[in-house]
Every structure is written in structure tokens, then in C-alpha cells.
Amino acid sequence: MSDSTVRIGLVLPDVMGTYGDGGNALVLRQRLRMRGHDAEVIEIGLSDPVPESLDIYTLGGAEDAAQRLATRHLQRYPGLQQAAGRGAPVLAICAAIQVLGHWYETSSGERVDGVGLLDVTTAPQETRSIGEIVTQPVAYGLTQTLTGFENHRGGTTLGPDATGLGRVSRGVGNGVGDGLEGAVQGSVIGTYLHGPVLARNPELADRLLARALGVDSLPPLDLPEVELLRRERLRA
Ligand code: GLN
């Protein structure tokens, strides 16, 4: 690995890997390599401290019990919080939004203190939200419709320091009546969108990568298959 290698941290895939969100790290790596960058995925498991020196981080969704283990690990090894503090981009999917918030309540009513990177709190909704979701972006300089698949019981309330990622046009999203999905605060993006979200939404992948590389934008990639899949999903 050379000094210029872009290092993508896949945080706790051993416990936050239930929904295939590890694919986000592969999309980031592939989009970098297609543009001629060296890029590697560094998997950080429950037996590893969390390094603060990586270029970009991604965390996936999980069930309540796994999510509790992840929370404890991130509190014990605060490398992610330090990296976010210096502006490294962090993408947190589903359970990970909840873990990065102030606290979350599990489906069985237990309240767990989170990591405090996002000004959000999460409590269980009456019913689980499952299905395709479509949102119109309202943050992070995004312009293209976001699509994904949601599967969560928790409903997330944003505090004043966080803004939504998108306005829901189909599906539930944060589920607390404000019509918003996700949470954005500084360099941290949380979203309920599985898919993996970056495979479905290349603009979001490239915004994260631009931030990691410290540039305004990246040269476009011509991938007609990705565009075709997007159109199909938006029609479905
Ligand atoms: N356990 C959390 C919930 O149900 C997160 C689920 C997920 O990550 N898909 O709200």
C-alpha cells in the first residue's frame, strides 16, 4: 500500500454486516480504482481498535443485539469520532445512524447511550418499516433522487445540529412525522437506505469520495448499466 492509497474503513462488518451494506466499501474502492487511484478496504472487526487515520469510513445495519456490541466497541475505541472530528467522511447505514446518535431504544424498550456523533435520538415505531424507499435529496450538495430499501423498527428524531438527507416521496424514512430520511452533520451522513445505497446512488458515492480526496468534484464515470438499474428501480 503506497502513501497515496485511499484507505476505506469498513467498520465492524462482523457485527454490522447483516444487510449487505459492506458493499458500500466495495463501490467506493471500485469508483476510485476506475479513476486510477490506489484504494484498499480496511476491515475493522470487534477484535481491532478503530484507527483514526483512515480516509473514509462506512458502517452497516444490524439487529439490536449486534448494534449494542458495536456501540460498546466504538465507545471503547473512539477512532471514528476522532476521524469525524477532523472532517473524514463517515457513511452510517440504518442501525449505524442510531449507534452514532445520543441514544437509541431497542425494540424491547432498553435505552442505550450512543456515540454522540449525530444529534439524533431513536425510539421504536409501532410497526417495522420495510420496503422500497425514494427520497429527494436536501443536503450534501446532492441533486439526484435517492433510492434504497428500508428495514427498521426504530424511528429517528433529528436535533438542531443535524439535517435530513432527503425528503421522502415513497416509503417511511426517519418515521417521526417530519417527512425526512437520514441525518447529516458535518462530514457524517446517516441513512436508512440499504441497497447497498452507494451501488444504487453513484452521486452519493462520488460526493463522499470528493470529500475524502479534498476536491470539489470527480471526473464522471460512464456506467450505463448503473443508470439503467436506477431507472428500473425508480419505475418499479
Ligand atoms: N435494529 C435497528 C432497527 O430495527 C436497525 C435495523 C437495521 O439496521 N436494518 O431499527
Image (cartoon, grey):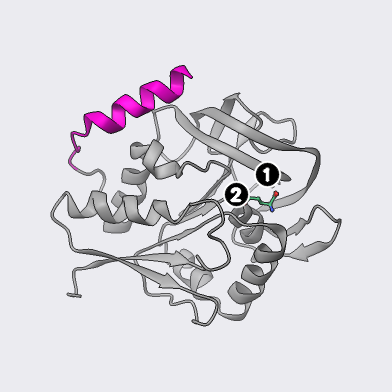
* Residue contact between numbered discs 1 and 2, judged by CB atoms under 8 Å: yes
Residue 63 vertical placement versus 153 (above, below) = below
| Residue at 44 percent of width and 25 percent of height | 233
Q: Is any part of residue 114 visible from this angle? A: no
Q: Is residue 51 left or right of residue 121?
A: left
Q: Amino acid at mark 2?
A: Cys
Residue 152 bears which disc, if any?
A: 1
SS for dot 1: strand
- Answer whether residue 24 is magenta in the image: no
- Say which of 70 and 13 sits in front: 13
Whether residue 80 can be seen here: yes
Q: Amino acid at mark 1?
A: His
| Secondary-structure class at tag 2 | loop
Q: Position of residue 122 (x, y in %)?
A: 74, 50
User: Residue 71, image x and y in percent?
Assistant: 65, 69
Task: Decide if residue 69 is on the left or right side of residue 53.
Answer: right
Q: Would you say residue 222 sits in the magenta stretch?
A: yes
Q: Position of residue 44 (x, y in %)?
A: 45, 73
Q: Is mark 1 within 8 Å of ligand 1?
A: yes
Which residue lies under the disc numbered 2?
94
The residue shown at (17%, 49%) is 34
Please indicate whether residue 120 sits to the left or right of residue 89 in the image. Answer: right
88 in relation to 93, above or below: below
Q: CA distance from mark 1 to mark 2?
A: 7 Å
Does residue 21 sit above or below 75 in this rendering?
A: above
| Residue displayed at 71% across by 64% down | 65
Highlighted range, magenta: 219-236
The yes-or-no answer for disc 2 within 8 Å of ligand 1 is: yes
Closer to the chain start, of discs 1 and 2, is: 2
Left/right of residue 233 with respect to residue 135 in the rendered view: left
